[in-house]
Amino acid sequence: MDGDFLYDTSTRLQVRELHRKRFLLRALQAALVVLICYVAILWVARMRRTSRTVMARNAAVAPAGAAAKAPMVAMYNWNSVEMMKQQYLNTETPDTRGAQFERLFVFIKEDRLERSILSPAHILEYLGDPDLAKTVDGQQRFVYFYNKHGVKDWCVEITFNAEENAIAIVDAHKATRDFSDYAPYSNQSGSGASGKPVPGQKTEDSGF
């Protein structure tokens, strides 16, 4: 009887010790989860503070208002544009526009939203004179033809609003566009510095 009693007592003690160890293990696991969550919260808070600091610095140095439009233009990646422009001018002409012209205008098109102003003067500076142009309801439009799969089979149509800021740049096959109301572009004295179409000229005269 005494042996059985001692055996039962020893068993109970082992079970209690096992339960105690399990409880401690679970408590340790819970504490570890809490610690991980706390560290994650601190990290997120730090990242938010860092983000706010960066945004505040950018806001402090960024130009504001309409008067800042000209400085914003200077933020454009002029080095890349200049390099592409030189490659275009060195290898192609208005009659042989091709890969270099496409590379240049695609770069300008993709980065257009990074600028405050993309005026007709900027386009003329880097793409040269367009083949066709027109002005409708204060919106000026330029059309450039270039060789993509054939001879002048593709075109780029650029639309400027009344404030002379590019609002649309379309690249499409020439056959999908209607140029019946366009006129050949002229930047001579007869058309003025704005480069608007010469009155009375027809699109057929351009040879496109």
Image (tube, helix red, strand yellow):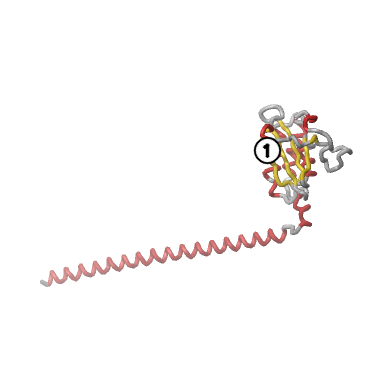
Q: Residue at x 24, y 67 (%)?
A: 15
Q: Nearer the viewer, residue 92 or 78?
A: 92
- In this picture, is 6 found above or below 68? below
Expressed as whole percent of the image width and height from the top left, the position of residue 161 reads 75, 48
Secondary structure beneath dot 1 equals strand
Residue closer to the observer: 159 or 69? 159
**Horizontal relation, residue 18 to residue 203: left or right:** left
User: Image check: 120 left or right of 154?
Assistant: right
| Residue situated furthest left in the rendering | 1
Location of residue 64 (image quadrant)? bottom right
Q: Quadrant of residue 87?
A: top right
Point out residue 89 in the picture as x, y percentages from the top left corner.
77, 34
Which residue: 49% across, 63% down? 39
Q: Is residue 129 visible?
A: yes
Disc 1 crowd, CA 10 A, few/some/many (<14, 14-19, 20+)? some
Q: Which residue is mark 1?
A: 171
Q: Residue furthest top?
A: 150
How many numbered discs sit on the rendered protein? Answer: 1
Compared with residue 198, is residue 119 higher up or lower down, i.e. above or below? below
Q: Position of residue 58 (x, y in %)?
A: 68, 58
Q: Residue at x 21, y 69 (%)?
A: 12
Quadrant of the snapshot with the N terminus: bottom left
Observer able to see residue 87: no
Who is closer to the viewer here, 37 or 177? 177
Which residue appears farthest toward the right when viewing the image?
189
> Which residue is depicted at the point 65% across and 60% down?
55
The C terminus lies in quadrant: top right
Q: Is residue 99 left or right of residue 122?
A: left
Q: Which amino acid type is marked by label 1?
A: Asp
